[in-house]
Image: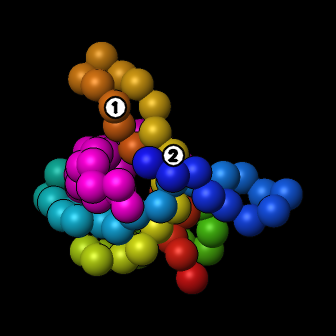
C-alpha cells in the first residue's frame, strides 16, 4: 500500500469502498495495491465533513488508516476524498 496525503497533513492509504453491508454497518475497502481490508463502522473514525455510515457508498474513493485487532488487519479511519 502506498502512503499518501497532503503536505503537512495526515497521511492515508488510498482505496475505494468495495462492498457495504447496510444491516450490520460493515464493509470492505479495496486498497490501491489490491488488498481487501474489512471494517466495522462502530470501530471507525470518520474524517472530513461526512460522519455517518449512510454517507458511504460503494465505489467511493477514500483515504484510510488501519490497525491490528484480534481478528487481523482492520480499517480504523476513513476519510472520503472530496
Residue drawn 27% across and 55% down?
34
Asked which quadrant contains residue 7, the reply is bottom right
The answer, for residue 31, to whether it is visible in the render is yes
The answer, for residue 44, to whether it is visible in the render is no
Q: Which residues are magenta?
A: 26-45
Dominant secondary-structure state across the stretch colored magenta: strand
Asked which quadrant contains residue 6, the reply is bottom right
Residue of label 2: 65
Q: Residues within 10 Å of mark 1 (few under 14, many from 20)?
A: some
Tag 2 secondary structure:
strand
Lower position in the chain sequence, tag 1 or tag 2: 2
Tag 1 secondary structure:
strand
The image position of residue 9, as x and y in percent, is 78, 57
Asked which quadrant contains residue 30, the reply is bottom left
The image position of residue 60, as x and y in percent, is 36, 76
In depth, the one of 22 and 8 nearer the eye is 8
Q: Farthest residue in the right direction?
A: 8
In depth, the one of 25 and 27 nearer the eye is 27
The image position of residue 15, as x and y in percent, is 40, 63
- In the image, residue 67 lies in the stretch drawn in magenta: no
Q: Residues within 10 Å of mark 2 (few under 14, many from 20)?
A: some
Give the Cα distance between marks 1 and 2: 10 Å
| Image quarter in which the C terminus is found | bottom right
Residue drawn 42% across and 74% down?
61
Q: Farthest residue in the bottom direction?
A: 82
Residue of label 1: 73
Residue drawn 37% across and 61% down?
32
Q: Is residue 14 left or right of residue 73?
A: right
- In the image, residue 41 lies in the stretch drawn in magenta: yes
Amino acid at each position: 500500500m502506498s502512503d499518501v496525503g497532503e503536505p503537512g497533513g495526515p497521511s492515508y492509504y488510498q482505496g475505494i469502498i468495495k462492498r457495504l453491508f447496510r444491516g450490520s454497518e460493515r464493509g470492505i475497502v479495496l486498497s490501491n495495491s489490491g488488498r481487501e481490508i474489512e471494517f466495522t463502522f462502530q470501530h471507525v473514525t470518520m474524517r472530513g465533513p461526512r460522519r455517518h455510515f449512510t454517507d458511504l457508498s460503494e465505489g467511493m474513493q477514500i483515504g484510510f488508516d488501519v490497525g491490528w485487532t484480534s481478528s487481523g488487519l482492520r480499517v480504523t479511519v476513513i476519510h472520503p476524498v472530496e
